[in-house]
Image (cartoon, rainbow, N blue to C red):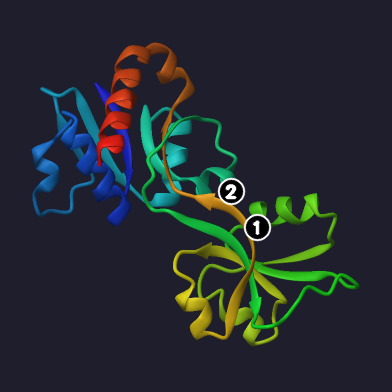
Amino acid sequence: MINIALPKGRLGEKAYGVFEEIGYGCPSIRETNRKLIFENEENGVRYFWVKPSDVAVYVERGVADVGVVGKDILLEQSSDVYELLDLGMGKCRMAVAGKKGGRIDTDRTLRVATKFPNIAREYYRKQSLEIEIIELHGSIEIAPILGMSDVIVDIVETGTTLLENDLEPWEDIVSISARFIANKASYKFLNEPIRQMCEKMNEAIKKS
């Protein structure tokens, strides 16, 4: 039995579609209910629906053998897992954004509002810029507008939200997409079935 942690929401549903397509389906997961754990003994899989930011924690601690998680979460949490495959889903980018036409003032400490403090800190450390992190959990875009921060570090998909709030992307930090990950011990003891699953996913993604 392979335990699989999936993120709740659109990304998880899309990822499950791939698992189903390659022979790891679990019919009960398609039923309308509020269950979080689904098992199919015939296909040898058990799925968990968890909060997207918790997927890597379940995998790292071995509760799940494998999982699907965004690269942004792996970078932010520095998760101790194997990253086996880029699924090419949920593509976006981590970027620095600020007011339209603005620029970074390097003569003083840069105030950075973000939900991703570790990614932001590492990015500016490499630039040897002194920063102050302002950690927020929502509506990041209004922080520079209200003068609380100079810039934001956040996920950008289309950039529409930024533009509608008189902001614009200044610098890209890293490209983001969903990754197939594995617990290190599980990868050792369930190596063959996990590798087969990974190879089938890779083939399915190439065809799509």
Q: Where is residue 168, by image quadrant?
A: bottom right
Q: Estimate how packed mark 2 is, as few (under 14), some (14 to 19) or many (20 or more) residues with alpha carbons within 10 Å.
A: some
- Mark 1 residue type: Pro
> Quick one: label 1 or label 2, which is nearer the N terminus?
2
Q: Residue at x 86, y 70 (%)?
A: 106
CB-based contact (under 8 Å), mark 1 and mark 2: yes
Residue 78, position as x, y percentages in the image = 60, 40
Q: Is residue 153 above or below residue 144?
A: above
For the question of whether residue 176 can be seen, the reply is: yes
Q: Is residue 201 left or right of residue 29?
A: right
**Residue 22 image offset from top left, x and y in percent:** 19, 30
Q: Quadrant of the N terminus?
A: top left
x, y (%) of residue 104? 78, 73
Residue indicated by mark 2? 76
**Looking at the image, residue 180 lies above or below residue 117:** above
- Mark 1 nearby-residue class (10 Å; few <14, some 14–19, many ≥20): some
Classify mark 1: helix, strand or loop. Answer: helix
Q: How far is the residue under mark 1 from the one under mark 2?
A: 8 Å
Q: Which mark is residue 117?
A: 1
Asked if residue 118 lies left or right of residue 5, the reply is right
The answer to whether 108 is drawn above or below residue 46 in the figure is below
Q: Secondary structure at mark 2?
A: helix
In percent of the image, x 58 and y 45: which residue is there? Answer: 75
Q: Could you tell me residue 4's position as x and y percent?
A: 30, 33
Give whichever of 42, 199 is nearer the camera.
199
On the picture, is 137 further left or further right than 89? right
Residue sitting farthest toward the front: 207
Q: Is residue 142 above or below residue 110?
A: below
Give the position of the C terminus as an image quadrant: top left
Q: Residue at x 12, y 53 (%)?
A: 33
User: Which amino acid is tagged 2?
Assistant: Glu
Query: Which residue is at 45% across, 50% downward?
Result: 53
